Image (cartoon, rainbow, N blue to C red):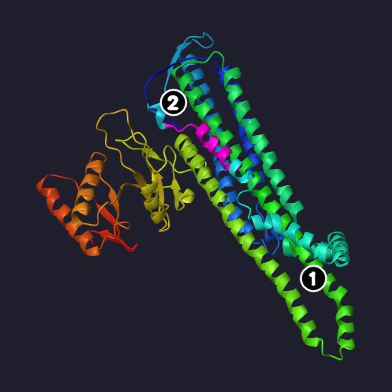
Amino acid sequence: MTADLGPQTLSVSPEEIATHAETVDAFAGRSEVCAATVRQLRLDTGAYGQLCGFVPAVLNGITSTIESTSIDASGSLRETADGLRRLVSQFTAADEAAGRLGSGASTPLDNPLIAPRIDSTTWFSGVGVYETFDLLIASICSGTWIDVTLAGVGTAVEVVAWGLDPIGMAFAAGLGWVVEHVSFLSEAMDWLAGDPDQVNAHAQTWANAAAEQFALAEEYRRSVETQLPSWTGEAADTYRRRAAETADLLTALGKSYETMSTIVASAGTLVAIVRTLVRDLIAQCIVTLIYRKSKWAAEAAASLGFATPYIAAEVSTLVARFSNQIMRLLHALVGSLNRLATHARQLDELITTIQDLLRRRWGGHGGLPQLQPSATHPNVYFGPLGKDFKPAIVEVAREFDQKERAIANYFVDLGVNVEAIKPVDSIDYFKNPDALFRWSPDDSGRLTELKTLNSGSNEAVRKNILRAGEQLDDHGGGDVVIDGRKVGLTEAEARRGYARAAGQAPLHQQYIPEKVYIILGDGTLLVLPDR
């Protein structure tokens, strides 16, 4: 990353920086090993069985995002090492030219590591990100996402069954043991209900990668302190600050590994529960049929066939009982998975935040798109996301409020990448846009105001369009979204309000947004002006 701020005064031993560059390169290598490990952690349906075969579809997409972010992190470290080596070359060349090599004198340099002067509050600390990971892990570990049916149905059924039919249950217990210890029966159970041991191995691998990532981040942080004792000046301060931020992000990336380990382990628990319940239900059904077959045959013979309707009813009752248990199991399984998927989607959003922060610090390397800072707002970065584009809400430095989030979710469903913009509060009367919309991988981004109506009148539409124009005018323009769902806004009132705003703006030299997206009361989207 190159930035020209004019001469910068440095006092440093080139050997220190060169040694530190080699250390950072080694860290990059370790980070690449973590990325390669993640690449191998995609799951197939074999681990979760046919009953839980939809779990990998939820987790593999997140694994891909984590892998991509891990590659970006190692690329960032490589870029850092290269920048340090360039700095050494510039320092050495300047000293040689001045005939002062090794004299210890300070040398003015155009330093490739120094970033443009931006208020430090622009950068969102990674600490906040991994605190959010901790909350997510605690939520998953609480087990509240697992349906109570899965936690209790097995024990309840077994207690009742043992009381009613202890001999049959003893046979069922023995059959359950056989299923788990005879290879072809165990493999059949693996196919149907999954292999918890394989899932737990994946979870442990995620945990191992997390431990390595945590160690890497901490060692990088310490190396800056121990390997560069004599480096002083503005460049040194800038590097130390940015290195601390990068170490925070590396730690946050480790937290993503740790969270994934927790999710996979929790899914493993679900697999184990389902496997146990399915195995026991199958064993109980088979043993009950075998155990009662002779009894039913004797009853039919003794009654000369008159007991046949009674026996048929008893068989039907038995089948219905097992069918109901299986249906309860499947419903509970789907409900549990949906709740786990909610946690997984939260993880995906956090990973997207880390990736965005890495891109902002080290844009342009290793295939990462280069984002350009806005000339009018310190927290806005324009530029296409390329391969990193995906419909999502990106909350790097602030979160949307409830009304804004409702609008953002609407447009994410339409395929838009919606980024919240952190407002500048330190400057009086500064106009802060709400969001940056990207509609495609090649879209550099459009500033977009998010307005929610309190009235379904055309006057409310007119006012909100013009207010959005005031917010956007100082930043070169943009678009506005007006949400009229809660007030039942009609198309007629929306068009009338837009026409009034469009007519008023030129008369009063007011800016009107280039595109006005109006969500009507029935949820349909009206885009004005009509093209």
Residue at (51, 40) in percent of width and height: 354
Whether 100 is drawn above or below 253: the answer is: above
* Amino acid under disc 2: Ile
Which label belongs to residue 447?
A: none
Whether 138 is drawn above or below 335: the answer is: above
Q: Where does residue 435 sit, x and y in percent of width and height?
A: 35, 45
- Residue 385 is left or right of residue 27, and the answer is left
Residue at (65, 65) in percent of width and height: 328
Is label 1 in a helix, a strand or a loop? helix
Give the number of marks: 2
Spatial CA span between label 2 and label 1 = 72 Å
- In the image, the segment drawn in magenta is 123-137
Whether 235 is drawn above or below 362: the answer is: above
Which label belongs to residue 285?
A: 1
Task: Please tell me whether residue 130 belongs to the stretch shown in magenta.
Answer: yes
Say few, some or many: other residues with alpha carbon within 10 Å of mark 1 (under 14 / 14 to 19 / 20 or more).
some
Task: Please tell me whether residue 90 belongs to the stretch shown in magenta.
Answer: no
- The residue that mark 2 highlights is 114
The mark that comes first in sequence, 2 or 1, is 2
Q: Where does residue 252 sit, x and y in percent of width and height?
A: 56, 36
